[in-house]
Image: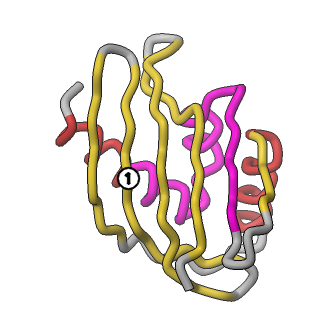
């Protein structure tokens, strides 16, 4: 996997997750997923895979309007079975859309690439 392919895989992840594709989300995120969210005021919150799948399923069941897929990629690197993508994107949560700075850690495991860790920081 090279950095260009890792960015393409991340673009696919963004599309599928923002369109609430539950089976895709279940297979693309590793079972030991940890998402760390840091708000503007420094509050830290975390989410695991079960919570993420529940969030995506809830939006899918509610037939929610897909979220924005807009992303600006700043950096991507892949070495062996690990990869990292750094990007800025607008992520809609609780009816509010604001730019967030993301870091995704990809790992090749169980014969496929999966997101193992993800973090984001609110910018505004």
- Tell me what residue is drawn at x 78 percent, y 51 percent: 46
Q: Nearer the viewer, residue 45 or 9?
A: 45
State the residue position of label 1. 86
Could you tell me which secondary element the residue under label 1 belongs to?
Answer: strand
Residue 17: image quadrant is bottom right
The vertical placement of 12 against 116, above or below, is below
Instruction: Please give left or right for residue 21 compared with residue 57 in the image.
Output: left
Residue 44 location (% of width, % of height): 78, 60
Q: Nearer the viewer, residue 67 or 48?
A: 48
- Residue found at the very far front of the displayed protein: 42
Residue 115 location (% of width, % of height): 53, 35
As for residue 115 lying within the magenta part, the answer is no
- Tell me what residue is drawn at x 37 percent, y 60 percent: 87
Instruction: Please give left or right for residue 46 compared with residue 104 in the image.
Output: right
Colour style of the rendered protein structure: secondary structure
Residue 71 location (% of width, % of height): 35, 68
Instruction: Please give left or right for residue 43 compared with residue 118 in the image.
Output: right
Residue 37 location (% of width, % of height): 69, 59
The magenta span reads: 12-38
Q: Nearer the viewer, residue 80 or 17?
A: 80
The vertical placement of 84 against 93, above or below, is above
- Tell me what residue is drawn at x 66 percent, y 88 percent: 96
Q: Quadrant of the N terminus?
A: top left
């Amino acid at each position: 996997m090279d950095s260009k392919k890792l960015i393409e895989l991340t673009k696919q992840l963004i599309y599928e997750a923002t369109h609430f594709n539950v089976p895709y989300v279940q297979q693309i995120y590793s079972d030991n997923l940890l998402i760390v969210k840091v708000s503007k005021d420094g509050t830290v919150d975390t989410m695991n895979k079960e919570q993420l799948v529940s969030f995506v399923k809830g939006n899918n069941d509610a037939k929610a309007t897909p979220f924005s897929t807009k992303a600006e990629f700043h950096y991507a690197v892949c070495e062996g079975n690990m990869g990292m993508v750094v990007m800025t994107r607008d992520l809609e949560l609780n009816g509010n859309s604001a730019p967030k700075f993301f870091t995704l850690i990809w790992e090749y495991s169980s014969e496929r690439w999966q997101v193992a860790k993800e973090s984001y920081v609110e910018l505004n």
